[in-house]
Image (cartoon, rainbow, N blue to C red):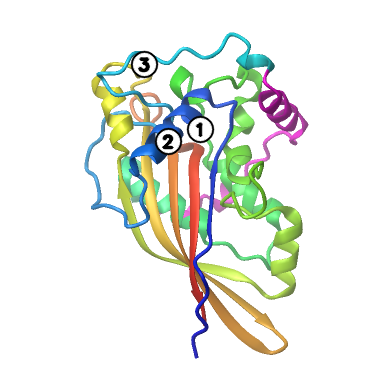
Amino acid sequence: MTHRHLPTSRGSRRSALMLVSFLLAALIASVGLWALSGNATSTRNSPPKGALTVSASQTPVTPPADLGQDAAVRRQLEQLRAMPAPSPDPAQRDRIPDEARSHPDLYAAGFVTALLTQDYRTPRRQFLAWVDAEAATTTEPLVVGLVPVELRDRLAVYSVTEQSDGPGTSPVPSAAEWARLAALGGYTTVADVRVSEPLAWSNAVDAGRVTDPGVTARQVTATITLHTTAAGRESATRSSVSVTADFEGPPSRTSWGFVNVVLYTSLRQGTS
């Protein structure tokens, strides 16, 4: 028996610190490029990044002179500094097939699938150690924005856990929510994964606004099913999810790695 619910949409732009990413997110949202319907797999291998992208016909965006003093930026900088130092667990890198590490589309699909496939019965810190193991850094100004050099190694985990827009607005639940789902024997499965390159990003690449030849962006859409058990009754809640993220790879690196999530949107479909 299926119980229908009114769709609930949750979404978040990752961080004001990532100025370019933040502005590109606004641009993408304004033209609906990350609609949950998804697109066919892209084969483009130019350096796209789901960060601030400006079309070729637009003039560069100049941030306000006092942006560095913005309260949100200060708060996020404090959160980044307070985060534990990265603790990667290379032993868990088998979550993504080796053959997927040589192409941005395959890597984006593999990484986001692994990111959204969560078993709450296992330690959250172990899961984040896997994210750390997949982390890559870039010096591209349109990607790292206002993030200081010494904090960029924490950006990957920060971008998948930061919930400044409220609960449920990041790919990885908070520690409290992870524990709650663990008590319900919760875990997620992922299906219908599709990958595309954000048009706004490709416009920026074509306009020569991207300086790092190894950075790229992809939008990944998927269907997530959350499985839980309460009072002996199993339930499955389905959601449509869209993730726009940045990745770094050849020629800057020998294989592809994860930089940060720029946009995350979840739309609940129903529970059975």
- Above or below residue 103? Residue 187 is below
Is the residue marked by circle 1 packed among few (<14), some (14-19), or many (20+) residues within 10 Å? Answer: many
Residue stretch rendered in magenta on the structure: 70-97
Is the residue marked by circle 3 packed among few (<14), some (14-19), or many (20+) residues within 10 Å? Answer: few
Mark 1 = which residue?
136
Mark 2 = which residue?
247
**Disc 2 to disc 3, how far (Cα)?**
14 Å
Residue 262 in the magenta stretch? The answer is: no
Kindly identify which numbered label has been placed on residue 211: 3
Residue 96 in the magenta stretch? The answer is: yes
Is the residue marked by circle 2 packed among few (<14), some (14-19), or many (20+) residues within 10 Å? Answer: many
Q: Is mark 3 on a helix, strand or loop?
A: loop
Query: Looking at numbered disc 1 in the image, what kind of residue is underneath it?
Result: Ala
Q: Is mark 2 on a helix, strand or loop?
A: strand
Q: Which of marks 2 and 3 is nearer the N terminus?
A: 3
Asked if the residues shown at circle 3 and circle 1 are in contact, with their CB atoms under 8 angstroms apart, the answer is: no
Answer left or right for 56 relative to 137. Answer: left
Residue 68 in view of the camera: yes
Q: Main secondary structure of the magenta part?
A: helix
Query: Looking at numbered disc 2 in the image, what kind of residue is underneath it?
Result: Phe
Answer left or right for 192 relative to 235. Answer: left
